[in-house]
Image (spheres, grey):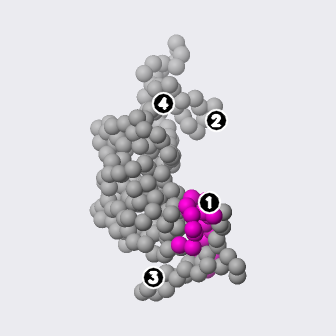
Amino acid sequence: MTVDLNQQSAVLPRNATLTHTLETWTAAFSPYTRRIQARADEPVGPNEEKDDRQYDLYTTIYSGGDDSLTGHNAGVTAILPVSLANLDGGRIVVTGSYDDYIRVYSILDPMDTGGIRRATCLAEQDLGGGVWRLKSVFQATSDGGRRWSMRVLASCMHAGARVIDIDGDVSGSCQISVAARFEEHKSMNYGSDFIQKDTLICISTSFYDKLLCIWEVKDRSGENMEVRDVSSS
């Protein structure tokens, strides 16, 4: 059975339901997968041939089952699929966990691996607090598409907010660095957002102290980024 998610009235088959042995904190659709070949098991009607068409389907990334992302030592609380890929077709996905780590994975779709989704952890970095949410600031490629880079805004619970730079190439090399920190929150930073103008303007919130902060991040050539609290400016 095939399901075309581009159709407004598409209904998922019952066997598409996924179950977990542990609690699920988050889930994400990845709109960057390639087209897949889908074939129905039975004709749609008595006078119709078997369906053998291509559909643009979203691939669901989740923590559970035989193709789960391994390497986390606690619950996965953030999943960020991005529009970057390695030479072998592995799509780049960034995750955050209660174990304080941000991780970068390369994920090969089942159609490329004989029916098994294969995930490889390319890099990981301890951010000092549970990585609750991730937001992509930008993604870019260089060197004729052989190198890629991205910037991520991370909400890191009791550690505050982080601006993360991730650099890699299509061979699978990857490095993570903390470009900026905002640590004025006295409680759990669960939410952050940004707008990009001449500088990066960020907003972040914390839970028990009911605090909302607006802060500015400036690039300084050859140095760490400058962070300035502009909440009262």
**Residue 52 in sight here:** no
Q: Which mark is residue 174?
A: none
Mark 4 falls on what kind of element?
Answer: loop
Mark 1 falls on what kind of element?
Answer: loop
Give, as a three-letter code, the residue at label 4: Thr
Q: Provide the residue designation for mark 1.
A: 208
Query: Could you tell which of marks 1 and 4 lies nearer the N-terminus?
Result: 4
Can you tell which of label 3 and label 1 is closer to the viewer? 1
Give, as a three-letter code, the residue at label 3: Asn
Question: Which residue sits furthest top?
Answer: 46
Q: CA distance from mark 2 to mark 3?
A: 48 Å
Question: What percent of the width, then of the height, locates residue 149?
Answer: 42, 68
Indicate whether 216 appears above or below 84. below
Q: Which mark is residue 8?
A: 2
Q: CA distance from mark 3 to mark 1?
A: 30 Å
At 36% across and 55% down in the image, what residue appears?
105
- Which of the 4 image quadrants contains residue 68? top left
Label 3 CA crowd tier, 10 Å (few <14, some 14–19, many 20+): few
Indicate whether 25 appears above or below 43. below
Question: What percent of the width, then of the height, locates residue 125?
Answer: 37, 65
Question: Which residue sits furthest right?
Answer: 233
Query: Could you tell which of marks 2 and 3 lies nearer the N-terminus?
Result: 2
Q: Provide the residue designation for mark 3.
A: 224
- Magenta segment boundaries in residue numbering: 183-209
Query: Could you tell which of marks 4 and 3 lies nearer the N-terminus?
Result: 4
Q: Provide the residue designation for mark 4.
A: 17
Can you tell which of label 1 and label 4 is closer to the viewer? 1
Position of residue 90 in the picture relative to residue 194 (left or right): left
Mark 2 falls on what kind of element?
Answer: loop
Residue 191 inside the magenta-drawn segment: yes
